[in-house]
Amino acid sequence: MLRRCGFVVALIIASLAAFDASALERRVAFVIGNSDYREISALKNPAKDVADVSDTFRQAGFEVFVASNLTKLQFEDQFRNYLAAVDGADIAVVYYSGHGFQIGGENFLIPVDASLKQPADVEVQAIKLNDVLQQMRSKSKIQVIILDACRNNPFPRKDYWLRDQLVVASGAGLAQVRSSLNTLIAFATEPGAVAYDGAGDLSPFSSAFARRALAPNQEIRTVMSAVRRDVVEATKGLQVPWENSSLVDDVVLMRRSSRPSLPPVLEKVVLSGAGPINLDLPEPVEIDGGTVTVSIERPPTLGRLMLDGKVVEAGEQIQGKDLPRLQMDVPKGIGATEEMDMLAYAARDNWGGEARGMLVFRIKSGEGPQGEQVMASLEAEQKQQVLERGIHITGAAEAIENREIDIPVGVGPIPLKLNFPTQDPAVSLKVASYPATGTLSLPDRILSPDSSLMADEVDRLRYEPQIGAGKTVEVAFEIRAGSAASKPATMKLSPAVDPCDSAAGEPLDLQGVVPGLLPNEIGTDAVKLCEAAVKAYPDVPRFRYELGRALLAARKVDQARKAIQQAADRGHVRAVFELGYLYATGTGVPVDRKQANTFYAAAADKGDPYGMTSWGRALFNGYGVERDTAKGLDLLLKAAAMGHTYAMNDLGAIFTEGRNGVTADQARAVAFLAAGVERQDMYSMNLLARNYLSGAGVEKNPKTAVALFQKATELGQPYAPGNLARMYRDSVGVERNPAEAQRLFEMATMRGDPSGAFDRAVLEMEKGEKADQVTAVRFLAFAAALDTRNQLPEARTNLAKFGTKVKTTALKQLRQELRSKVPASGSLDSQLVGAARRVWEEANPRRDVF
């Protein structure tokens, strides 16, 4: 039976403890393969490319996001999840295989649903490579983009809008990209040239990359040189991969610095004259996968070391899996008095890692009755050891098998707390099935699909779910211990979104984990839920920001501002934007457009689409800052490219009217508004409906306008009810229905539309003698109260025409609807308008609505 040699082991462990493991690198890859295009020819390779390349990155210890056949909307959603995961990462990688081409020196990646039939389509249907790079740059230390997408423009149309110019797509392949510091951009072929699909399942480039990237401890520029040689050879010089690099740090994809795991010093009693005796040495465990070779450094001198009946000499090498089958044959006559001998060996993996082991022999005589007693005792110990290891393996399997664990999303790696029942050094776990999403790790290393771990490491096992992946994943292990039969064990890990995220997460938050809610959708329980999240995860700034949102919804403005400031101080970018919004709207602070712009600019610099939109809007229009139309337009286009519908709506208005020197283009406006509608934005629906009503940029179609106004109304848009009411009032696209018009005008009033309130008053006044004058006064008062920009002076003008008696009655009704008293001061008209405002605010207690 083997025993650890305690004193020597303690010395070795003490010496190893002097070396600190380097901090884990956070490395995240997004692998995309687009094959099944709807409007252009399909590509045969990307689907297989994405499978092999994603496996390569998993083997290298990356968290891997994998996507195939992405539409534009799907890309936006998955890229946002990727950006949330890559926040603060050491290395961010995007690998793209699919259609891609250049327009005017700008490179575009093409989603599978792109049609690119109109000049504005490239802005709303394609993905600008430079936007992807800038987002990665704002999040990570090192950026790597690998493109197997250098193809010609396959679409019939060749001229497209880029910012303020109509540009013709004339160049072949992709254009060269200027990389900023610590960035590498690799192309399947040189700039301006076209990549080939090749004859196999993989493209020549992806095939070479998937193979070469697995070379251990090779810097990426060395890897790409090898890829280039392979592709040139495979294509007979027709395709030459290319890269732009500004890396100042080494990037090693397949980093391997571990060594085989084995007990350093063991002890065993061996009998002389008993023939070959099994040494039962544990098999070396390669924790990163691969194979292990054992070199016999010093064989025993008092006997022969045997394997399969043959003597093993000094310097001889055997396979790691054969180490447990080594035997020792000590001839008779040795050990009459106990003697000591030793075996020294080294285990080396194919990554260059090395571990040394030693077996100390206590040799006793196996002759005579005393020898028989020792032999019987050893055989009993051996049987007991086998029995104990079988029990250990069974207990270990039971600790894992059928476990179902909920793991919170977006709070870092979570310990699984398996309470593993053994720390037997002979017990190891080989990963048999790696989770489809997310990352398994130990505090000192990321596990890959080929990894193993020792029994004493299991209780430190952690899992971090992938953001956006809601499905339960399975993790399977093969549990082994020496010659005992191995056992499989499988557990299930379920990503669990924190209730705070569900209650107060925000749309397009690049550090968020959920699609998010609009401010008016936040419920009354959000504050309590987010307070609990902040207490549980004080180092996660997202929860402080979401607590701030919840407090704002509860109208606890001072507390909200404090929570938002804390989140911003801890690095939450959307919180920086929100501070700007508080200053822009005067929520809890004096209105300060200049201060708001400072926060907007800071958020925009960090890639936040809300920040880009607000800062872009300020620059374009000169709100609190010197006007810079070009920069403002560029920021709005970038925000729209990320799926921010507010930016799309701004661009729709700019191109509809032709503002600040930007050429009016109704069709371009419609393209952005249609993109907003596709993303279910109620404001885009309302605006596009107006285009269909007037025929601006589209064929006039009142019925389509009605449908869009109706949908926007259902979603809560404030102005759509009034627009739809006018169609019922005037019989445009629908049959005339004064009662429905009246209902919709009243709905518009309660949503804050002053024009809707005014038109409801007019509708009443047009009834002549049947008019309810009190109702008319009431809605005129609402119209004036809601007209905060003084764009509807006729509301006050018409209000002034009514008599004192009617106004007094209307004022009394309004005051009866209030929960608190309003002091009677000022003119009767002023009191009416003030009471109407208070009634409306009490009915709409959300600062984001008014």
Image (cartoon, rainbow, N blue to C red):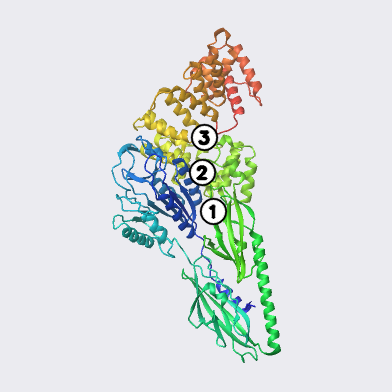
Q: In which quarter of the image is residue 689?
A: top left
Are the residues flagged by discs 2 and 3 in contact, CB closer than 8 Å?
no
Q: Give the spatial CA distance, label 2 vs label 3.
A: 20 Å
Marking on residue 509: 2
Are the residues flagged by discs 2 and 1 in contact, CB closer than 8 Å?
no
Q: Nearest to the eye among marks 2 and 3: give it.
A: 2
Task: Identify which residue is drawn at 34% across, 35% down.
Answer: 119
Which percent across, then down, holds residue 71?
44, 42
Residue type (three-letter) at the residue carrying disc 1: Gly
177 versus 325 height, above or below: above
Which percent across, then down, holds residue 664?
35, 30
427 versus 122 height, above or below: below
Q: Mark 3 points at which residue?
A: 585
Which percent across, then down, holds residue 608?
47, 44
Q: Give the spatial CA distance, label 2 vs label 1.
A: 20 Å
Q: Nearest to the eye among marks 1 and 3: give it.
A: 1
Residue type (three-letter) at the residue carrying disc 3: Thr
Residue type (three-letter) at the residue carrying disc 2: Asp
Left or right: 633, with 766 as reference point: left
Task: Identify which residue is drawn at 68% across, 77% down.
Answer: 381
Q: Which of 200 and 711 is in front in this view?
A: 200
Q: Give the spatial CA distance, label 1 vs label 3.
A: 40 Å
Q: Mark 1 points at which residue?
A: 438
Q: Nearer the viewer, residue 733 or 368?
A: 368
Any part of residue 413 in sight: no
Q: Which of 848 and 675 is in front in this view?
A: 675
Any part of residue 356 in sight: yes
Q: In which quarter of the image is the N terminus?
A: bottom right
Which percent across, then down, holds residue 596?
48, 39
Farthest residue, direction front: 309
89 versus 126 height, above or below: below
Q: Nearer the viewer, residue 452 or 585?
A: 452
